Amino acid sequence: MDKVYLIGEVGPNHNGSVETALTMIEKMAEAGVDCVKFQMTDPYLLYSDDSFKASYQKKNDKAKGAREMSLSYQLKREAHIPLYEKCKECGVDYVCSAFDLESLLYLDEHFDMPYYKIASGEIFSLDMIDYISEQNKPIILSTGMATYEEIEKALVLLNRHSQKDITILHCISNYPAKYEEVNLRNMITIKEKFGYNVGFSDHTVGNECAIAAAAMGATMIEKHVTLDKSANGPDHKASIDIPELTSLVSAVRHVEMALGSFDRQFSESQREISRVARKSLITKHAMKAGDIITKEDFCFKRPGIGFLPIEQDQVIGHRLLVDVEADRVIRKEFID
């Protein structure tokens, strides 16, 4: 299979610190991710005065409201410039999800991102969707909270100017997502229903679901990452730390190798073991050259370097060309 594209999502887990964000890039690159992803917004363009926090945000963050929470974890737009350069230095892609049109335009003007990432909550932000639909760049579309009909509408909007290269991410928009809510099999249904590559934006605790998604054919996996799960902030407790990320990358790469192809294949190691573990026709007693072999003259024992038990009809009734001691393999060159 092709290599799974692994995205380390920083989100607000830099807690507004450029130095923390730079450290996260270094450590995630060392762990082996393909991409480090950030988020950008102007909280005054994203949140109205009526906005409120989700339950998990109230539990994990001390700010009074949604806008106040966002402001407390914001990086200034220009702060992303050294992050972009750091990603290039570390050999990973820099990608940033925009949550308002001004941020999206800034990102497009200042950074050469390999694709647009549309967050689940922005699937119907028409100003951004309209802009992205006019560009010629691959798109990753997260689909948390979206019905099939809503996914279909978003795809129509994105493709209205030209057919786009889109990867649809199956996603459960909860932090953390419960295992019983994840419904990974739906990822396969999405692929069959819409005909696009699929991936998984994983908000569960631990790595099991992400690894399972790789085994089920996900072409991309996105996972929130933190340097400290105990830090104050809305996403830290639903994120994995660097050792867990390293383990995830290793596991996914092993899954890639293990999946192989749909064809039955036999490696040299399998051939070697078959010689050791399979059985051959073995003489029950000493036999002389000229003896006619009967079924009573042999039994089945290891190793598998002679006639297999299922090949006994090729031996019975044939004449030995050489003397053979008891408990020896009846080799093909021993009979006429």
Image (tube, rainbow, N blue to C red):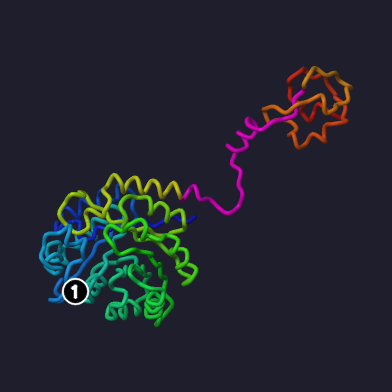
For residue 237, side relative to residue 44 (left or right): right
Circle 1 crowding by C-alpha within 10 Å: few under 14, some 14–19, many from 20:
some
Name the image quarter holding residue 283: top right
Residue 240 at x, y = what percent? 28, 51
Spot occupied by residue 3 in the image (x, y as percentages of width and height): 44, 55
Asked if one can make out residue 88 in the rendered structure from this viewpoint, the answer is no
Quadrant, the C terminus: top right
Residue 177 counted in the magenta span? no
Q: Is residue 31 left or right of residue 234?
A: right
* Residue 259 counted in the magenta span: yes
Which of the two residues, 325 or 90, is positioned nearer the viewer here? 325
Residue at the extreme bottom of the image, as rendered: 160
Which residue is pictured at 33% across the width and 53% down the height?
A: 33
Front residue of this view, candidates 221 and 29: 221
Identify the residue shown where x is 19% and y is 74%: 46
Q: Is residue 23 above or below residue 45?
A: above
Q: Position of residue 124 (x, y in %)?
A: 31, 77
The residues colored magenta run 256-283
Between 85 and 207, the one nearer to me in the picture: 207
Q: Amino acid under label 1? A: Leu
Reading the image, the residue beneath label 1 is: 46
83 in relation to 156, above or below: above
Can residue 302 be spotted in the picture? yes
Rendering coords of residue 245 (x, y %): 31, 49
Q: Secondary structure at mark 1?
A: helix
